[in-house]
Image (cartoon, rainbow, N blue to C red):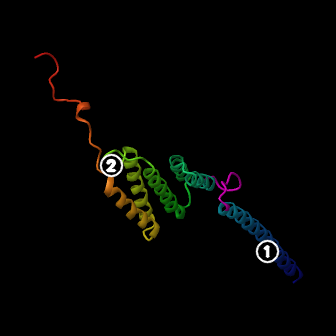
Amino acid sequence: MTVYRKHANWLWGSLTVAGIVGAVYFGWQLHTLQALNQQIQAGTVIKQGGSAYLQKFTAAYDQGQHGDYKHAVQTYGQALELSPPAEELPHIHFNIGNNLFLSGLVRTINEDGTFQDEARYAFTQAKIAYEQTLRLQPEDKAAKFNLALLHSVMARGMQAASKDQSHMELSNLPIGLP
């Protein structure tokens, strides 16, 4: 009977120590995550303490906030290469779409009111990013709104710019002397 009690006491003591160690570990993780959340809410770029994905995401967000849309899209692309959690994918694609949309809006327009080729390309890529967001998260109202807004902007100025006929290559001319 005393052997049984010793084993039972040892088992319960081990479980108690394991529980205390687990509680301390999860408390430390909670503290670390709260510190990261405070940095994110303050708008600072996370350079240490977070995952590589989180560092890329905050760097891309910061670039987009400062108007560096091209680099923000590139950095979001790098964040996608780091295999982020599945629930973060719609947010990344949404932010890519936002930065491409804004990039297209800051491009100048041609004399005839059509968008430049860079703007047309940015809008097309933004449309793809918003559609990807909606494939991953169909109920995302912000992505639906931005896609509808993008469609209204594209409808007004997306006709291709006319090419000047004097600079076109005439490929049906015979080569050589007649």
Separation of disc 1 and disc 2 at Cα? 71 Å
Say which residue label 1 marks.
Answer: 15
* Front one among 158 and 126: 158
Quarter of the image for the C terminus: give it.
top left
34 versus 7 height, above or below: above
For image coordinates 42% across by 68% down, the residue present is 138
Which numbered marker is on residue 114? 2
On the image, which quarter does residue 45 sit in?
A: bottom right
Percent coordinates x, y for residue 97 in the rendering: 46, 56
Q: Is residue 32 left or right of residue 145?
A: right
* Front one among 67 and 60: 67
Quarter of the image for the N terminus: give it.
bottom right
Q: Amino acid at mark 2?
A: Thr
66 versus 6 height, above or below: above
Q: Residue furthest right?
A: 2
* Dot 1 or dot 2, earlier in sequence: 1
Q: Is residue 55 visible?
A: yes
Q: Is residue 25 left or right of residue 83?
A: right
162 versus 134 height, above or below: above
Q: Is residue 43 left or right of residue 157?
A: right
Give the secondary structure at mark 2. Answer: loop
